[in-house]
Amino acid sequence: MLGEPIYDRQTERRSATTVEILDAAWFVARDKGLADLTLRDVGARVGMRAPSLYSYFSSKNAIYDAMFGQAWSEYLTLLESLAMPRSPRAGLKKIAHTFFDFAVADLARHQLMNQRTIPGFVPTPEAYAPSVRALERTHAYLAGYGITSLEHGDLYTAIIGGLIDAQQANDPGGDRWARLLDPAMDMFADCIGLPGRGRRST
């Protein structure tokens, strides 16, 4: 019928191939290391010669860019789905565990999202936007518990990031530093004067 949208199989196939390429890129990054990702290896995973990938991505950095945006979009969706507790200390711990668990579950993803491991790679504004929204959402959660100082927000982020780095570097797959998250959050809460003084939050 006139006026109905045309079903575009070519666009659908292209979108499916793009997703397949990104999946392959993540596989290679996890298998060989993020910095050692090559177009040849990605192409081999999807049955393409490396030059054919340029029909979908203009460069290897463009693949990194799409991966960066995808990773932060996934975390943003997770963050926005949280049911936050009333207790400030419990809330701090819930956000901390959410980010910590997401980070340590995938080293390559964490490196791309949060560490400058790829020389010359700078995410485009479009790919960077989900990370900004995730930070804004985190600050909104903290503000709901009365934490509005930029300095306090930075300290909170630094504590979690330091524990993530220690966990990945020294006990990958374990929980040595994961077990320190709750005590660290209580120390942070004590430092900024939240109620509870280190009591177990529920």
Image (cartoon, rainbow, N blue to C red):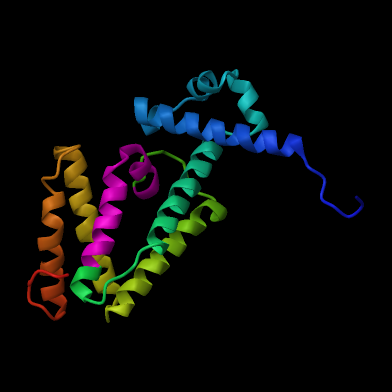
Q: Where residue 14 sits in the image (x, y, percent)?
A: 67, 34
Image point 31% across, 70% down: which residue?
84
Residue 155 shows in the view: no
Residue 158 is at least partly visible in this image: yes
Residue visible at 43% across and 33% down in the picture: 26
Q: Which residue lies furthest to the front in this view?
A: 1
Q: Main secondary structure of the magenta part?
A: helix
In the rendered structure, the answer to whether residue 3 lies left or right of residue 96 reads right
Figure check: 124 above or below 198: above
Q: Nearer the viewer, residue 128 or 79?
A: 79
Q: Is residue 8 placed above or below 47 in the rendered structure? A: below
Give how far across and how far down residue 24 sits, in percent.
48, 29
Left or right, 190 with respect to 134, comes to left
Task: Examine the structure image and report whether residue 104 is included in the region drawn in magenta.
Answer: yes
> Which residue occupies the foreground of this view, 161 or 91?
91
Please identify the quarter of the rendering in which residue 143 is found: bottom left
Boundaries of the magenta span: 92-114
Residue 40 image offset from top left, x and y in percent: 52, 20
Question: In this view of the protein, which residue sits in the foreground, 93 or 151?
Answer: 93
